[in-house]
Amino acid sequence: MKKGAPPKYTDKYLKDILLKYVSNNPGKKINPSRLERETGINRFIWTRRMSEQITKINQPVEQKVGTKNLYPLPNVVELVETHWNNKAGLISALAHFNEMLNALYQKAKDYESMLKQNQDLVVNLSSKEEKIKLLEHEIKLLRKQYLEVAVKSTYKTFQEEGLEKIISITKNKNAEDRALNADIVKMYPELFDN
């Protein structure tokens, strides 16, 4: 037989008050001092009689994903088994789950926007690469035309048509006139199809 005065508060009454407190303050860590301020029930009563329930409420249930524990994922079976008769604990665990779900949703939105941004950059990059190829091709054509004009300018027949001398074939200043005026087609007919 137990000695002392009968308890002023029943366990069911304390659990109901704890449930209301958790419902009004989801996600907040519970401690006996805060409970005393909110409910008017002495913190020693909360510590002595409800410490186990308070500890369960304050600890979120975690499950590992693969080898990394990126986000604490709740194990539904363990949640129900742990908090079967403890509504306050279940509410607290689900509040933690809700916070985690919101964080994951935000990360998914950020990922989608980053994925779209990457796709836009890939499209932009491919158009730039295509433009670079076109410009390189144009440079090759212009270089070829320039060389043709430069070579033609060395022939006296083209110089008479108004094409000025662009390059000199030899570096020797004395032989420059002779080299520029030489008709290469007449000198080397085997090189040309004419």
Image: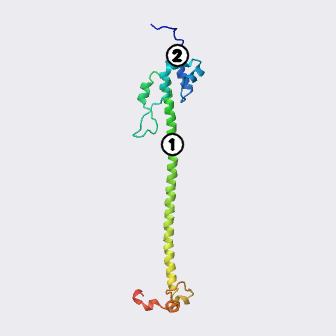
Mark 1 secondary-structure assignment: helix
The number of numbered discs placed on residues in the rendered structure image is 2
Q: Name the spot of residue 75 as percent of width and height, x first.
A: 42, 31
Query: Which quadrant of the rendered structure holds the N terminus?
Result: top left
The answer for how far apart the CA atoms under marks 1 and 2 are is 41 Å
Which amino acid, by three-letter code, is at mark 2? Tyr
Q: How is the image coloured?
A: rainbow
Tell me, yes or no, whether the two marked residues, 1 and 2, touch with CB atoms within 8 Å.
Answer: no
Residue under pointer 1: 107
Which amino acid, by three-letter code, is at mark 1? Lys
Residue under pointer 2: 13
Which one is in front, 19 or 64?
Answer: 64
Q: Quadrant of residue 193?
A: bottom left
Residue at the spot 49% in from the left edge and 81% down from the top edge: 148
Residue at the spot 52% in from the left edge and 11% down from the top edge: 7
Residue at the spot 49% in from the left edge and 30% down from the top edge: 94
Q: Residues within 10 Å of mark 2 (few under 14, many from 20)?
A: few
Q: Residues within 10 Å of mark 1 (few under 14, many from 20)?
A: few
